[in-house]
Image (cartoon, rainbow, N blue to C red):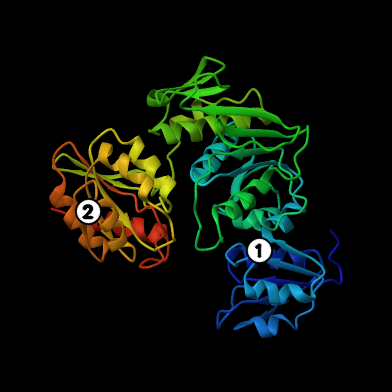
């Protein structure tokens, strides 16, 4: 893609926008950056900055290429305005990938993307193959492309937002972990969300490999399929939560060789190993797990106090993640749930709560609606803030149980993100006496 003497508009001044601008400047473009924020900073002095932008301004902006950041609604009024006078619209992932010349493993799914992305990068890096986890997690792809020595392989987490704006994106291996309703505050219906994620398969052909959870909808394409399951042993990869098997041969002992636990993590491990072996068949998949530490905020043990485990699963920003966390628990649970109202239907959770939970504490914007629903099957208390929720949960917990923060929704009603929420939970729990 030649950008010499081209006018490039970057919409969104966050980290991915800065990386895209730097890459466009490297390729000889004239770069304009627009954002609704009152101030824009951190850009190369050659970029022309336009803070406090709006739809009226956008409708009058002409560009050869419009690059939008994933946090901006592709189909919202701001993008619609800027798209009126552009020759082409793409996202930062599509833009950066067109300049990357290594091998690509792309990972999507409603839950488990980040853990799987990290495991893939760990397996490759510790086997002497340069790899960076990037994309929706960690480093924007455009930053990776700008490295003096880009990695041989990228472990690229891709969200539905990033996949909305692809055109030619074609990974060698596409990993589909799972699908469940999410982001109903951005999409008009579940089918729209599914179609956006399903675009990961759009350009694949007979040279491609798809690693997919057994039972998920498959695309109609000639790629090579590899399936994995924790339910059906008649799959290429299978786990009972204790060992990982490939074609009925034990590949990994989860309890001996890793610090990961739970069926959902078994699925992440299988998907990662299968994806890596699709590109590098002789990879060592045991040694790297000896030192691998999973990302924080994912069923993370914060503390054991008076026989009660306190688990931080703040990354559970949707119903499916909450369900996975509950299913993985071996102790009775006092659940802390709540946050922003994303328009999700939590009624499917009721049978699982009856089996796994002793009590529930709800908090945040969605506290009362959740309490009204959950109280139909289990003792439920409601409060406003997370510190109040921890105090109430501690009162209900007894030795041999777990207090599980698994909110089931996003955190933006009270926190800057799930990390902020999880760190706050950690601090509160460490102050308990």
Secondary structure state at the residue bearing disc 2:
helix
Q: Quadrant of residue 202?
A: top right
Residue labelled with disc 2: 430
Residue 159 image label: none
Give the residue drawn at x 86%, y 61%.
2
Camera-side residue of 387 and 87: 87
* 304 relative position to 113: left or right: left
Left-right relation of 184 to 6: left
Please identify the quadrant where the N terminus is shown: bottom right
**What residue sits right under mark 1 in the picture?**
19
Position of residue 174 measured from the top left corner of the image (x, y, whole percent): 65, 39
Position in image of residue 306 (x %, y %): 13, 42
Answer whether residue 431 is visible to the viewer in this image: no
Residue depicted at 56% across the width and 82% down the height: 39
Q: Is 368 located above or below residue 256 in the figure?
A: below
* Badge 2 or badge 1: first in the primary sequence: 1
Q: In this view, does 286 lie to the left or right of 428?
A: right
């Amino acid at each position: 893609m030649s950008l010499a003497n081209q006018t490039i508009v970057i919409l969104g001044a966050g980290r991915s926008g800065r990386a895209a601008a730097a890459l466009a400047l490297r390729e000889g473009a004239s770069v304009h950056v627009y954002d609704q924020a009152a101030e824009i900073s951190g850009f190369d002095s050659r970029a022309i900055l336009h803070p406090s932008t709006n739809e009226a301004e956008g409708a009058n902006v002409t560009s050869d290429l419009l690059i939008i950041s994933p946090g901006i609604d592709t189909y919202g009024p701001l993008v619609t305005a800027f798209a009126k006078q552009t020759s082409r619209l793409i996202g930062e992932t599509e833009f950066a990938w067109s300049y990357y010349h290594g091998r690509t493993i792309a990972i999507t799914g409603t839950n488990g993307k980040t853990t799987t992305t990290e495991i893939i990068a760990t397996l490759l890096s510790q086997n002497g193959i340069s790899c960076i986890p990037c994309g929706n997690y960690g480093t924007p792809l455009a930053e990776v492309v700008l490295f003096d020595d880009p990695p041989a392989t990228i472990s690229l987490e891709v969200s539905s937002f990033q996949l909305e704006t692809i055109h030619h994106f074609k990974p060698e291996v596409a990993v589909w972990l799972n699908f469940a309703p999410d982001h109903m505050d951005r999409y008009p219906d579940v089918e729209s969300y599914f179609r956006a994620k399903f675009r990961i398969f759009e350009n694949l052909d007979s040279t491609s490999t798809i690693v997919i959870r057994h039972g998920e909808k498959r695309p109609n394409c000639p790629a090579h399929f590899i399936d994995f399951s924790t339910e059906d042993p008649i799959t290429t990869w299978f786990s009972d939560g204790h060992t990982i098997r490939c074609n009925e041969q034990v590949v990994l002992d989860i309890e001996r060789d890793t610090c990961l636990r739970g069926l959902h993590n078994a699925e992440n491990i299988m998907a990662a190993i299968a994806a890596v072996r699709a590109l590098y068949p002789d990879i060592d998949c045991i040694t790297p797990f000896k030192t691998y530490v999973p990302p924080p905020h994912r069923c993370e043990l914060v503390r054991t106090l008076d026989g009660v485990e306190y688990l931080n699963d703040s990354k559970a920003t949707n119903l499916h993640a909450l369900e996975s966390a509950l299913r993985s628990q071996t102790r009775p649970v006092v659940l802390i749930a709540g946050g922003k109202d994303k328009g999700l239907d939590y009624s499917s959770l009721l049978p699982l709560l009856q089996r796994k939970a002793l009590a529930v504490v709800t908090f945040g914007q969605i506290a009362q609606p959740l309490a009204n629903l959950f109280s139909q099957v289990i003792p439920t208390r409601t409060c406003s803030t997370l510190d109040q929720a921890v105090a109430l949960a501690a009162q209900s917990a007894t030795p041999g149980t777990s207090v599980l923060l698994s909110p089931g929704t996003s955190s933006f009603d009270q926190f800057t993100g799930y990390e902020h929420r999880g760190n706050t939970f950690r601090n509160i729990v460490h102050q308990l006496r």
